[in-house]
Image (spheres, grey):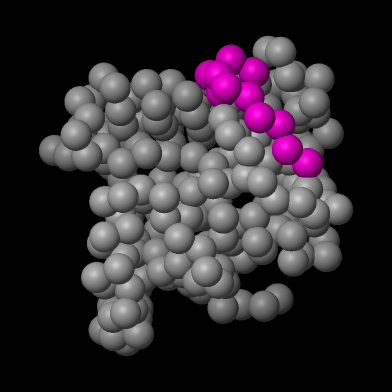
Amino acid sequence: MKVILLGATGMVGQGVLRECLLDPEVESILVLGRRSIEQHHEKLREIVHTDLSDLSAIEGSLSGYDGCFFCLGVSSVGMNEEAYRRVTYDLTRSVARTVAKLNAKMTFIYVSGAGTDSTERGRLMWTRVKGKTENALFEMPFKAAYMFRPGYIQPLHGIRTKTKLYSVFYSILGSLYPLWRLLFPKYVTTTECVGRAMLKVAKRGAPKCVLENQDINNLCANRS
């Protein structure tokens, strides 16, 4: 299997990349991003492209892939809806259109979030925009499209978030993860689990297209 990964510098993307590199069924990983991940591996190839909203200059390098893991995202804190929509809905849709055009048999997996509103009419701005993004992806001509909606994600294996606000959050709550997992198993997961679940879905599909946190954990726990 050959995959494209966006958002490899982020916490979730780092976890997905780690699992891809460890998986013997993954033949190659193309990391596409605005800056280098500064990592080397025989299965890894990287394209640094400043404007991800326009991939026309590199289309020749984006065909022949079986899956696309879209882990790119930003916090909505301090952003108005128009700005958040540009970097969430507009950017994701633009990338998806390009890779769908070039890869008819591709499975596209998008990391959304718990609480995303598919009706696009929710009270919270980010839930509406994420819901609109999910709906747009379902309309793309992919072999299949899946939306991952994790809750709290615990970083493992030395992975860290690069978002300052989240870094403070994880430094405070991270030590309590065993307790969260015990008390709220349906709402917490790990970077490892998200990565493994995404790979499993890309290879074998899933019974439903919107996967909530518990679905992600179940996929991760099932080794078949």
Q: How many marks?
A: 0
The residue positioned farthest toward the left in the image shown: 123
In percent of the image, x 28 and y 80: which residue is there? 176
In percent of the image, x 73 and y 19: which residue is there? 58
In percent of the image, x 45 and y 60: which residue is there? 160
Residue 123 seen in the figure: yes
Determine the image quadrant of residue 50: top right
Q: Is residue 120 above or below residue 161?
A: above
Image quarter in which the C terminus is found: bottom right
Query: At which x and y percent is residue 31?
Result: 68, 41
Query: At which x and y percent is residue 4?
Result: 69, 40
Q: Is residue 31 above or below residue 39?
A: above
Is residue 91 or residue 168 the one in the foreground?
168
Query: At which x and y percent is residue 171?
Result: 30, 68
Is residue 169 or residue 118 the one in the foreground?
169
Determine the image quadrant of residue 78: top left
Q: Is residue 39 above or below residue 81?
A: below
- Based on the picture, tell me whether residue 155 belongs to the magenta stretch: no
The residue positioned farthest toward the front in the image shown: 38
Query: At which x and y percent is residue 86?
Result: 37, 21
| Residue 52 left/right relative to 103 | left
In percent of the image, x 54 and y 46: which residue is there? 9
Is residue 128 or residue 5 the one in the foreground?
5
Q: Is residue 76 above or below residue 165?
A: above
